[in-house]
Image: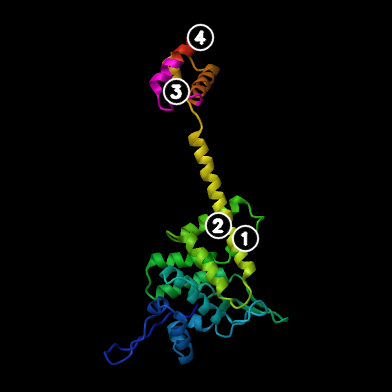
Amino acid sequence: MFARFGKRRHDASKDVFTEPTLSEALLSPRPSDTLLRWAHEGRLRDILPDLDALRGISQLPAHRDDAFVHTLKVVDAIAPIPVRRWAALLHDIGKGPTFIETPEGRSRFFEHDRIGAEMVLEIMGGAGEPPDLIADVHCLVSLHMRPIAYTPEWTDGAVRRLVEDAQECGPDGWYDLLALSHADLRGYLPEPVDRGLWVLNSLEARWRAIQDAGRDAARREVEQPASPLDGHEIVALAGREPGPWVGEAKSYLTDQVAAGELLPGDKEKAGSLLQSWLVSRK
């Protein structure tokens, strides 16, 4: 199993410095200061051994920073909101147990997102964090590789599936996932991240376009002229058996709405016009 979470805190006193808990450190303006100090002092092995295990995990040749330094940069780069800071802290936690170095010296981390999501449950559960927060972070870690994999060749359905999956990560899940993806990129600075930012910006623009198209279609449907009477109402008012004439009657009433001669909700006038129309067809 993965190393268990443990936490230590100095005894509080007016004259003695009190160590923050991990949760407190995560919400500080610059969490890396505390995390790096804990690593140098050897405390991180007790507080969060799975994070300490990322020290020295090479990401070459893709990135110069090891997985630990990259993680600290990502945590600093995201807003101090619990779900985002925890997701940033644990997004690459699965790189420790999945690290493989090829004979050519390349680092590989197959399924580190899936393994990392499993680790989230144990780590945060051991830290005593709320179940809802744990579930949201688990979701974000499991999805964190997908936004950067976007290409313009994705179908609208593929984009919708990603957004729907992200919306399972809490009330702001989609926006939390985007924030994590942007912080993940900034965690590689000063390396070039322009390509990655273009991918994320393109994904966001694509989703906005999908939303706009959906709103336009809904608006057109609402604005499209329609008969105030449905087929059942027309049959009842006419006292006739259903038949092709019902569709013709609806089309006639719809045309009257489009011409401004009949209001969309005016069933009384629609009934009168229907009766006149029926008489004219005899």
- Residue pointed to by mark 4: 280
Residue, far front: 260
Residue 48: image location, x then y, percent: 45, 81
Q: Which residues are magenta?
A: 258-273
Q: Nearer the viewer, mark 1 or mark 2?
A: 1
Question: Which comes before the other along the chain, label 2 or label 3?
Answer: 2
Pointer 1 and pointer 4: residues touching (CB < 8 Å)?
Answer: no
Give percent across and percent down for residue 45.
Answer: 47, 86
Mark 1 is on which residue type? Answer: Tyr
- At horizontal 59% and vertical 70% (from top left) the residue drawn is 111
- SS for dot 4: helix
Taking depth in this image into account, of 1 and 14 the one nearest to the observer is 14
Residue that numbered label 2 is attached to: 162
Seen from this angle, which residue lies furthest left?
A: 14
Task: Judge depth for marks 1 and 4 and give the one in front.
Answer: 4
Asked if the residue under mark 4 is in contact with the one under mark 3, i.e. CB atoms within 8 Å, the reply is: no
Query: Relative to 107, is 39 above or below?
Result: below
Asked if disc 1 and disc 2 are in contact, CB closer than 8 Å, the reply is yes
Marks 1 and 2, how far apart at CA: 10 Å
Within 10 Å of disc 3 (Cα), the crowding (few <14, some 14-19, many 20+) is some
